Amino acid sequence: MSEPPWLSDAEQRAWRAYLRMNNRLTAALGRQLQAGSQLSIADYEVLVYLTDTPDGRRRPYELQQDLDWEQSRLSHHLGRMQKRGLVCRQECPSDGRGAVITITDAGRQAIAAAAPGHAAAVRRLFFDALDAHQVASLGQLADQVLDRLANDDR
Amino acid sequence: MSEPPWLSDAEQRAWRAYLRMNNRLTAALGRQLQAGSQLSIADYEVLVYLTDTPDGRRRPYELQQDLDWEQSRLSHHLGRMQKRGLVCRQECPSDGRGAVITITDAGRQAIAAAAPGHAAAVRRLFFDALDAHQVASLGQLADQVLDRLANDDR
DNA sequence: TCGTCAAGGATGACGTGTCATTCATTGCTG
DNA sequence: CAGCAATGAATGACACGTCATCCTTGACGA
């Protein structure tokens, strides 16, 4: 039942490298996006899922599942995006409690303008450093960890 | 010179899985740490590097390199940690511009109390899902990407 | 039908991160 | 030594996240 309490040297190294890569990568991607299109990564992700559906409408709770965000984070973020004219909030006709989020024209333009540059940056800064086998392993690794997280009973 | 502009399906999948794993993992680790010891992950990291040196003292610019944080983030964070009594700021005797950060007794106690649980959580939620080969690959992958980031000329 | 509880969502307070700016000191260089 | 760029660091404004809480509406069994 008892595991070694600390991480091995190899694990320490891998963990630190992973954390550092994360920091730098998201920082670089965020700056690229912001500079090129005034969008944060968070904005971008929201817009991605909104444009996934043809009419550009989605219930907040759906977005929440798409994005895997906390409910209140989403709510706050949508408020800010609304203020900037990227989305708009309406009452839901079929469920009196809920809302419907719609992407605005400005929102569509913003993500259309941002997407190529962002995808290129992800490729350039991340995938160009890896071969196909590594990409597959990464996907596999992430799935395993997600599984572990889902089954964690604490 | 021209790359495919978009990501392949395999890359898309790997990328999304990676992002999702990241979110969930840091959320889970953060909550575990916070619940067990009133420390954020950021607090923890700062304290780790402060306890790396025997006297528990370190210049801000050294911490900055250790942590790979923005200067102002570090400054703000140290301010908050100071307010909570985890570290203390002093003037640097040998460099009139600079400061010296010292870990307090409370800081030492806090990280001593937090470390076992945090390490255990990292093991349980992450490394337990992986085999030795995957750990090595991850380290390798992260190093490659870090290299790519360091050599990015934009 | 009523009462209870779950679901969908908003909000205020507060901690965190970034950007731009500011400031003093130090280290050169002429 | 005067002048000046670079270094070390703090700060204010503002965007972002989390937690706890609150409110309304829907669902459903007694």
Image (cartoon, coloured by chain):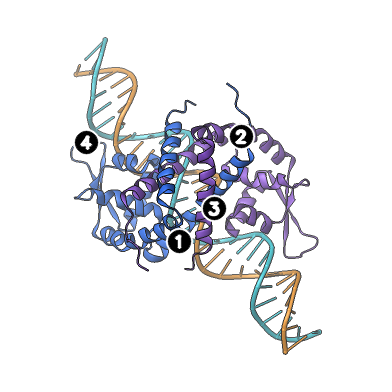
Chain colours: A blue, B purple, C orange, D cyan
Query: How dense is the environment of label 4, judged by Cα within 10 Å: few (below 14), some, or many (20 and up)?
Result: few
Count of labels in the image: 4
The chain under label 3 reads: B
Q: Distance between the residues labelled 4 and 2?
A: 42 Å
Q: Seen in the image, is A98 located left or right of residue B12?
A: left
Q: Which of C8 and B54 is in front in this view?
A: B54
What is the secondary structure assignment of the residue under circle 2? helix
What is the secondary structure assignment of the residue under circle 4? loop
Q: Distance between the residues labelled 4 and 1?
A: 39 Å
Residue B82, image x, y percentages: 67, 48
Rendered-image quadrant of the N terminus of chain A = top right
Residue assigned mark 4? A95
Residue B126 appears in view: yes
Q: Do labels 1 and 2 share a chain?
A: no
Q: Are marks 4 and 1 on the same chain?
A: yes
Query: How dense is the environment of label 3, judged by Cα within 10 Å: few (below 14), some, or many (20 and up)?
Result: some
Q: Seen in the image, is D9 located left or right of residue A129?
A: right
Q: Which of B100 and C29 is in front in this view?
A: C29
Tell me the kind of residue under disc 3.
Asp
Residue assigned mark 2? B37
In the rendered view, would you say A90 is above or below A126?
above
Q: Distance between the residues labelled 3 and 1?
A: 21 Å
Tell me the kind of residue under disc 4.
Asp
Residue A13, image x, y percentages: 60, 45
Residue A107, image x, y percentages: 28, 58
Tell me the kind of residue under disc 2.
Ser
Residue assigned mark 1? A31
